[in-house]
Amino acid sequence: MKLASFYNGRKKIIAFSKSFHGRTSLAVAVTDNPAIVAPVNQTENAVFLPFNDETALENYFNAHGDEVAAVIIEGIQGVGGINIASDYFLKKIRSLCTAHNSIFIADSVQCGYGRTGSFFSHDHSGVKADIYSMAKGMGNGFPVAGILIAPFLKPKHGMLGTTFGGNHLACAAALAVIEVIEEEKLMENAKSTGEFLISRLKKIDGLKNVRGKGLMIGFDLDTNLKDLRKNLLKNQQVFTGESKPDTIRLLPSLALRKKEAEEFLESLEEEILNMVSSNLVNQA
């Protein structure tokens, strides 16, 4: 199958609510955040459907399948709030893309590279995408990105070009990271440490909807804990991510050990206790 065939009358790319795929031209066009989409990036060719809604996806394909060039999805939404794509939803995307000759793009920049205990988070669902995007974890802090394409998408010399493409230092860093992940069994560590963290977090009062896979974890906060992230940083020197309005995101090093996870949990529980006590005093 030739890549050119996908552009023959196919203009639509399906993305999903709360998605985040980046800040460059087409990536931001399929990102569900109007605040960062400039007029030059806006396009009617990007279609946003509800996340994890199989019916909406199937209905769109039934009505417009011949126009769909690709579907892009994070296996676990990061910036969107640690929202996990269901196994059934990812399998539905795979089957519909196959049936309609569309491309399945697995955005694995944040949720890939071993973070969830599998190399790609999409692997948990037993599906194979046609394109995988990678970055962040590839270089363990060194700037490098990559893309994997299925064999039927035939590459040609000059198709992809960039000033820093093929950077030897970046390639060396990426190879070293792969070696460490394998030698230190970091995917296995992410899985076991993540399971430990999630099980303990579910027992802490004030934390709601604890969710995630491996070391990609999120939880929501009671109203009286809305300043928890700020207080963790100020009082415990613990830095976490967030998603508005009330979600805390945890994406620690894949080398995080159980002992370090326990230290984090102790700091978290201490700060929650301090905040609850302070609220009671203020209400008295």
Image: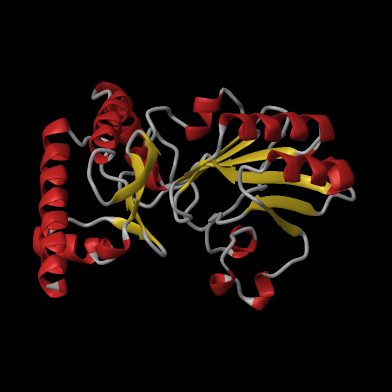
- Residue 260 visible within the image: yes
- How far across and how far down the image is residue 221, in percent? 32, 56
User: Is residue 272 toward the left or the right of residue 242 in the image?
Assistant: left
Query: Is 62 placed left or right of 192 in the picture?
Result: right
Q: Nearer the viewer, residue 174 or 128?
A: 128
Closer-to-camera residue (268/238): 268
Q: Is residue 6 left or right of residue 109?
A: right
The residue sitting at 12% across, 55% down in the picture is 273
Q: Is residue 7 above or below residue 92?
A: below
Location of residue 134 in the rendering, given as x and y in whole percent from the top left corner: 48, 43
Residue at 29% from the left image edge and 49% from the top image edge: 207
Q: Quadrant of residue 45?
A: bottom right
The one nearer the camera, 77 or 105, is 77
Q: Residue at x 78, y 46 (%)?
A: 69
Quadrant where the image shows the C terminus: bottom left
**Residue at horizontal 22%, vertical 43%?**
204
Q: Picture quarter containing residue 258?
A: top left
The image position of residue 20, as x and y in percent, is 53, 56
30, above or below 75, in the image: below
